[in-house]
Image (cartoon, rainbow, N blue to C red):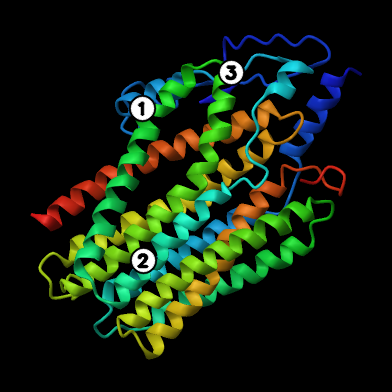
């Protein structure tokens, strides 16, 4: 994968803001059909972010920006309500509510990860520059709020369910699967919090600048695409583990 | 020099400037905390030897201190952006860490395992905001005028 790889067209007239970057997959790095590039991920990575130079004034000023707060503030009460309800469910040992939080949160978390990584990603790669920036500026702030909430909701309720159902006990016959789920979540947490989320935030801050740095956005987006693909594959492992436990 | 050239030079400077490996150290810290957390979670509620977890906790704590020391040696930096992102991220991750702590306390985890878990959560609650805030601020121009 490279930025400004072969074939990247660069038209850089003077007095323009260059948001010109190209992300392509080099066969030597990751051949078509590689394990980490199932289904649409190849297309997503191969799709180029060939952001053409934008006119200095009109287009830049018209470019959509992430909200000043980065995080959509109207969503915070919803997040607060979800977390409070979950705390109450944990305190009250409400098995149905815990099950609800775990199943709904886990389904959304897994579904969004797979959908964004394998479906939305390739589509974004084929949109026009303006559409891509507009989509990212509106989509990423919401993801900053949604994903940590879903993860917290799923993991806290899952832990409580495992305790109630005696799955945490080392004598449980499938305890190894439980530990495997801890490891998968741990790896995903490191990738998400150590690489993906910082890249997401840095892109949002860059998009708020009067003259966003296209090279930097390309570098961060490349990181985002790789990590989204890896977490997508990890989510498949989660599905295998959870269905093993439920069978 | 055209406006574009000036922009490119500034952009390249922001991307290529040499900074201490704050992010790398913070991710290493997080990996250690996650391993310690998995180790404890895999053993509780039964008896668990705390020695491996304590060793991991000490290593993680030392890494955080080294990281903070390295951070103080950074010269020109977008400190205002760093502080804003760190503050809000710290608030968010204190809430998350608080929920995890609450779950362990509710489950009856007590004594040594609870202390080690709590300290690991404290490291985690500081470490993640450090990664986020540094990752954002490193690409911002230093100085109040350019700061977000």
The part of the image, by quadrant, that contains residue A11 is top right
Instruction: Determine whether the residue tagged by mark 3 lies in a helix, strand or loop.
Output: helix
Q: For the view shown, which residue lies furthest in the right direction?
A: B1
- Where residue B81 sits in the image (x, y, percent)? 74, 52
Residue bearing the label numbered 3: A129
Name the subunit of mark 1.
A
Give the image location of residue B78, x and y in percent: 78, 50
Q: Residue at x 34, y 75 (%)?
A: B40
**Residue that appears at 45% across and 57% down:** A79
Which mark sits nearer the N-terminus, 1 or 3? 1
Q: Distance between the Cα atoms at labels 1 and 3?
A: 18 Å
The chain containing the residue under callout 3 comes to A
Relative vertical location of residue A229 with respect to residue B39 in this rendering, above or below = above
Decide if residue A110 is on the left or right side of residue A17. left
Judging by the rendered image, the residue that carries numbered circle 1 is: A119
Marks 2 and 3 sit apart, C-alpha to C-alpha, by 41 Å
Q: Nearer the viewer, residue B7 or B38?
A: B7
The CA distance from mark 2 to mark 1 is 32 Å
> Which residue corresponds to the image point at 54% horizontal and 49% vertical from the top-left?
A74
Q: Nearer the viewer, mark 2 or mark 3?
A: 2
Label 2, on which residue? A85
Q: Is residue A22 visible?
A: no
Callouts 2 and 3 close, C-beta under 8 Å: no
> Tag 3 or tag 2, which sits nearer the N-term?
2
* Nearer-N-terminus badge (2/1): 2
Work out whether disc 2 and disc 1 sit on a shared chain.
Answer: yes
x and y percentages locating residue B136 in the rendered image: 67, 47
């Amino acid at each position: 994968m490279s930025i400004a790889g072969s074939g990247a067209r660069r038209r850089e007239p003077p007095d323009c803001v260059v948001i010109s970057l190209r992300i392509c997959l080099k066969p030597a790095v990751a051949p078509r059909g590689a394990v980490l590039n199932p289904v649409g991920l190849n297309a997503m990575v191969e799709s180029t972010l060939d952001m053409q130079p934008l006119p200095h004034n009109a287009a830049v000023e018209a470019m959509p920006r992430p909200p000043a707060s980065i995080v959509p503030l109207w969503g915070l009460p919803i997040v607060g309500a979800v977390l409070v309800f979950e705390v109450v469910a944990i305190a009250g040992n409400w098995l149905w509510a815990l099950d609800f939080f775990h199943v709904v949160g886990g389904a959304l978390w897994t579904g969004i990860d797979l959908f964004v990584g394998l479906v939305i990603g390739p589509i974004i790669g084929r949109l026009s520059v303006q559409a891509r920036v507009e989509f990212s500026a509106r989509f990423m702030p919401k993801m900053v709020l949604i994903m940590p909430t879903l993860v917290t909701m799923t993991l806290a309720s899952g832990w409580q369910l495992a305790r109630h159902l005696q799955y945490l006990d080392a004598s449980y016959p499938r305890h190894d699967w439980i530990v495997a789920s801890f490891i998968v979540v741990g790896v995903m947490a490191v990738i998400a919090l150590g690489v993906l989320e910082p890249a997401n935030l840095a892109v949002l801050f860059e998009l708020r600048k009067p003259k966003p740095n296209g090279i930097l956005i390309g570098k961060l987006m490349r990181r985002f695409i790789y990590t989204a693909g890896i977490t997508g594959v990890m989510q498949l492992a989660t599905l295998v583990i959870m269905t093993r436990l439920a069978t | 020099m055209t406006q574009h050239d000036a922009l490119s030079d500034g952009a390249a400077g922001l991307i290529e400037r040499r900074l201490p490996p704050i992010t790398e150290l913070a991710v290493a810290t997080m990996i250690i905390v996650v391993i310690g957390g998995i180790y404890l979670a895999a053993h509780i509620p039964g008896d668990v030897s705390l020695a491996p977890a304590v060793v991991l906790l000490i290593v993680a704590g030392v890494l955080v201190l080294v990281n903070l020391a390295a951070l103080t040696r950074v010269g020109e930096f977008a400190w205002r952006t760093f502080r804003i992102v760190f503050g809000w991220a710290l608030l968010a991750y204190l809430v998350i860490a608080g929920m995890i702590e609450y779950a362990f306390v509710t489950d009856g985890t007590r004594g040594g395992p609870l202390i080690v878990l709590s300290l690991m959560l404290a490291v985690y609650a500081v470490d993640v905001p450090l990664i986020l805030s540094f990752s954002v601020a490193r690409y911002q121009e230093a100085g109040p005028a350019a700061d977000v």
